[in-house]
Image: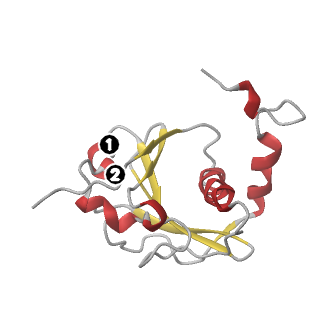
Amino acid sequence: MIDSSRRNRSGDWGRRRRSDHRAASVCPGATGRTTQGAPAGAKTGFYEKGDVHIRYVEIGTGFPLLATPGGGLNSRISNWPGAVINIMEEFKNDFRVISMDQRNATNGESTGPVAVDNPWDAFADDQLGVMDHLASASFSSSATASAVRSR
């Protein structure tokens, strides 16, 4: 069910807010780099907007699935191999799986300022910005908790 309270003043379900991200760029030469924690064959890139630099990886074809790795504020691509379900690995044959480092995650490669009055908007903007950058007008999302496999 869609929450109608999320509709912005113009009634367009957030299109105006998301269009801000279309001016972003990708770092030249970043695609194709190997990223720790990403499945073999995944493409790496960076979404940039002002002082914000977000590293993302993508693998597979099909409907886009934004997979957020566990870790809370330390959510990063390198967390996938230790996750209970490695969504990037499990769903790469059925979806275009996209994952990213959370802004300022320890040992991650995404950076940017975070407003102290409402930091969660920055993280949501990063996710929408990456998906807009990758021309994904619609997508599914999957987030995992901070659970890791016991060894």
- Residue 49 spot, x, y in % from top left: 72, 69
Report the residue that reaches farthest toward the front.
117
Tell whether 147 sits left or right of 42: left
Q: What residue would you read off at disc 2? A: 88
- Quarter of the image for residue 38 reads bottom left
- Residue 42 spot, x, y in % from top left: 37, 61
- Quarter of the image for residue 76 reads bottom left
Tell whether 20 sits left or right of 33: right
Q: Which of 133 and 126 is in front in this view?
A: 126
Q: Nearer the viewer, residue 51 or 6?
A: 6
Q: What residue would you read off at disc 1? A: 91
Callout 2: SS: helix
Residue at the spot x=67%, y=26% of the render? 3
Figure coloring: secondary structure
- Quarter of the image for residue 27 reads bottom right
How many residues crowd mark 2 within 10 Å: few (<14), some (14–19), many (20+)? many
- Evaluate whether residue 38 shows in this view: no
Marks 1 & 2, CB-CB < 8 Å contact: yes
Q: In the rendered image of this protein, does residue 26 appear above or below residue 39?
A: below
Amino acid type, residue under disc 1 in the picture: Phe
